[in-house]
Image (tube, rainbow, N blue to C red):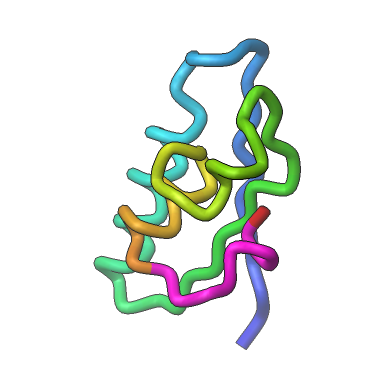
Amino acid sequence: MENKGFFVTGTDTGVGKTLVTTQIGRAIQNENISLGIMKPIETGVSSSLVPTTLSDAGLLKTALEISDYMEDIS
């Protein structure tokens, strides 16, 4: 199977990138397609919060029930 991907970008903090990414992810999962997620850059979050749902990466991991390690997501 060919690997495909999406890249979600926006111009500011709080414009909805994480929400849109979660909705795209759910749509993909609803089609029984394997999903991986990455948040390669996340600013404005204390490193002590990154493993939790208080970070965007943590929100994505939790909302989409991704089993990948946080270090692989963000």
Which residue is at the far front? 48
Which residue is at the far right? 41
Which residue is pictured at 61% across the width and 88% down the height? 1
Whether residue 31 sits left or right of residue 8 in the image: it is left
Q: Residue 50: image x %, image y %?
A: 57, 47
Choose top left, top right, bottom left or bottom right for residue 62: bottom left
The number of callouts visible is 0
Q: Residue 23: image x %, image y %?
A: 33, 44
Q: Is 68 situated above or below 70?
A: below
34 or 73: nearer the eye? 73
20 or 72: nearer the eye? 72
Which residue is at the far left? 30
Q: Within the magenta stretch, is there residue 68?
A: yes
Whether residue 43 sits left or right of residue 22 in the image: it is right
Which residue is pictured at 59% across the width and 44% down the height? 48
Q: Is 72 situated above or below 13?
A: below
Which residue is pictured at 66% across the width and 80% down the height? 2
Whether residue 58 sits left or right of residue 37 in the image: it is left
37 or 55: nearer the eye? 55
What is the span of residues highlighted in magenta in the rendered image? Answer: 66-73
Which residue is pictured at 53% across the width and 42% down the height? 49
